[in-house]
Image (cartoon, grey):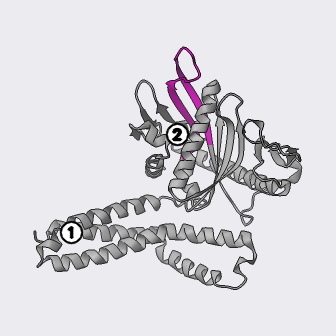
Amino acid sequence: MPVEREQIDRAEQIRSGLAQLKTSLDYDAKKTEIAEIDKQMTAADFWDDAEKSQSVVARMKALKALTKPMDEILAELDELDVFFEIGRDDEETAAEIPAKLRSVEETLAKLQTAALLNGPFDANDAILTINARDGGTDANDWAEMLLRMYINWAQSRGYAVEILDRQDNEEAGINSASVMVRGPMAYGYLKSEIGTHRLVRISPFNSEGKRQTSFAAVDVNPEIDDSIDVDIKPEDVREDVFRASGAGGQHVNKTSSAIRLTHIPTNTVVQCQNERSQHKNRATAWKMLRARLLQREEEKREQMMAEKYKNMAKVGFGSQIRNYFLHPEQRVKDSRTGFAMGSFHEVLDGGVHPFMEEYLRWRVQTD
C-alpha cells in the first residue's frame, strides 16, 4: 500500500500539536535546567546535605517526567519520516505506517494530559490523608479499601509510599491514615481525589444482608520545603506527645515518640508516629502541618475563583466527588466529570488513574 496523503496530514497535525506543547511546557527551559542539575550532581559535595540533594533529585525526576515523553515522540516522528521516505517505494514499509502513527498519537495524547499539570505545586510529592466518615464499621472498612487503592496506584507508577500515621478501628478497617507519596507529579495527580468518596454495597458487617452506604474523606497536600513561606506562629500550635502503637495495639512503644500538632486558629490537626524517634516524628508532623495550612490557602483561592464562575458545588474538601457501587450493579462514577468505569474491582485494585486524567481535562474546561 502506498503512503497516503491522509497519513502525511496526520503527521503534520502531530508536529503542530507538539510545537504548541513545547511552548506551553517551556520545554527548552526545562532541558536547560536538567543540564544545570546534571552539573550540580557531579559536584563532590553534592550529597553532603541529604535533604537538599533529595530535593534536587526530586526536581530532576519531575522535569524528566515531562521532557522524556517529548524526547521520545520527537524521535518517533523522525523515524516516521524515514518510513514515509522508504514507504513510497516499499509496500512492506508503507504497511507499518498506520501502526506507527497510532503509537505517536497515543504518546501525544498522554503528553497533552501531563501538560495540564501546571499548578505551582503539581510536581511535588504528596501527603494523602483518609478519614472514615458516616457509615459505622462499613465506613472504617471503606477507608481502608481506599488506602489500599491509592497505595496500589502509587506503586504501579513506581512511586514510593511511606505510612506516616495509621489509626486502626477496633472492629475492622481504619479510623484514619496519612501516607507520603513520592514521585514525579504525585500531588498533581492526587489532588483530583480531594473530597468525599461514597460506597454503596451489601454490608459484610450486617447479618441481615442489608445495603449500606458508607463515606470516607480524602485530603491531599503537597509536600513543601523550607523555601516556601508559611506563616505559623509557634504560640498558635499545641503539641501533644503520646505513645505510638501498631495494628490492634501491638508494638506499643515504651517511650512517648508519637507527635500530634494542633493549629489552634484553624483547628488543623496532624500527627505522625511512624518513626521511633520523637525528633523525626516532630519534624515530619511540622512538615505535614505546613503543607495542610498551605493547602487551605490554595483552597480559599480556588473557591474564590469557583464562586466567580458558579462552580462552588464542584470544588472543595466537603464535596462528594465519586460514587462506588457494588450493589445493585458494579460501577464507579465521578460526580464532577461524569466519567465512569464498569469494573469496580479494577478501580479498587489501583486502576484509578483514568479518573485523575479526566479530572485534569475537566478542570481546563471549567476554569
Up the image or down, 104 lies above or below 286; here it is below
Helix, strand or loop at disc 1? helix
Up the image or down, 237 lies above or below 122; here it is above
Q: Is residue 42 magenta?
A: no
Residue 97: give its label. Answer: 1
- Asked if residue 222 lies left or right of residue 35, the reply is right
Give the amino acid type for the residue marked by disc 1 in the picture: Ile
Up the image or down, 200 lies above or below 93; here it is above
- Asked if residue 128 lies left or right of residue 245, the reply is left
The residue positioned 60% from the left and 44% from the top of the image is 303
Determine crowd level at label 1: few under 14, some 14-19, many 20+ residues with C-alpha closer than 10 A.
many
Q: Position of residue 74 (x, y in %)?
A: 36, 74
The residue positioned 47% from the left and 40% from the top of the image is 336
Helix, strand or loop for the magenta stretch, by majority = strand
What is the CA distance from the residue labelled 2 to the residue labelled 1?
43 Å
Q: Position of residue 84 (x, y in %)?
A: 19, 76
Question: Where are the magenta residues, as a range?
Answer: 193-218
Helix, strand or loop at disc 2? helix
The residue positioned 72% from the left and 39% from the top of the image is 247
Tell how many labels: 2
Q: Position of residue 258 (x, y in %)?
A: 82, 47
Mark in the foreground, 2 or 1: 1
Q: Residue furthest front?
A: 250
Determine crowd level at label 2: few under 14, some 14-19, many 20+ residues with C-alpha closer than 10 A.
some
Q: Is residue 198 magenta?
A: yes
User: Which residue in the structure is indicated by mark 2?
Assistant: 314
Look at the image and tell me whether residue 361 can be seen.
yes
